[in-house]
């Protein structure tokens, strides 16, 4: 920002967001799980819009967690060039710990 201010250039700072996923009592649980999976697994979780927090209403928490765990266990982790892979490697071991 300081460098851009010297010549009055517009800048966009990519600071990494905290994008919550909200699941309300009247939610379609299957759709909410699909959205949470996409929000957290897209690009191996290495995007600023990653759903870093999931808030689920108590009344749908049990079915949500059950389905989320089931789908998460089914995710295929592997080599990024393998067409069957759904979740590939991280850029570094340190980044894997962070994500």
Image (tube, rainbow, N blue to C red):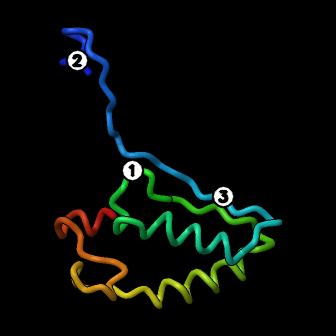
| Tag in front: 2 or 3 | 2
The image position of residue 65, as x and y in percent, is 63, 80
Q: Residue at x 71, y 81 (%)?
A: 62
The image quadrant that residue 33 belongs to is bottom right
The image position of residue 12, as x and y in percent, is 33, 29
Neighbours of disc 1 within 10 Å: few (<14), some (14-19), many (20+): few
Q: Earlier in the sequence, mark 1 or mark 2?
A: 2
Q: Which residue is mark 2?
A: 4
| Cα distance between the residues tagged 1 and 2 | 22 Å
Residue 22 got which mark?
Answer: 3
Check the picture and name the quadrant holding the C terminus.
bottom left
Q: Residue at x 50, y 59 (%)?
A: 51
Q: Residue at x 46, y 66 (%)?
A: 40
Q: Which residue is mark 1?
A: 48
Q: Earlier in the sequence, mark 3 or mark 1?
A: 3
Check the picture and name the quadrant holding the N terminus.
top left
The image quadrant that residue 44 belongs to is bottom left
Is 69 situated above or below 54? Answer: below
């Amino acid at each position: 920002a300081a460098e851009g201010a010297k010549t009055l250039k517009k800048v966009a700072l990519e600071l990494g967001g905290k994008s919550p996923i909200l699941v309300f009592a009247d939610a379609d649980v299957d759709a909410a799980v699909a959205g949470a999976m996409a929000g957290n697994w897209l690009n191996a979780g290495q995007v600023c819009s990653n759903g870093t927090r999931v808030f689920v209403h108590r009344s749908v928490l049990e079915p949500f967690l059950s389905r989320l765990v089931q789908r998460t266990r089914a995710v295929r982790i592997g080599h990024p060039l393998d067409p069957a892979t759904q979740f590939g490697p991280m850029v570094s071991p340190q980044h894997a710990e962070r994500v």
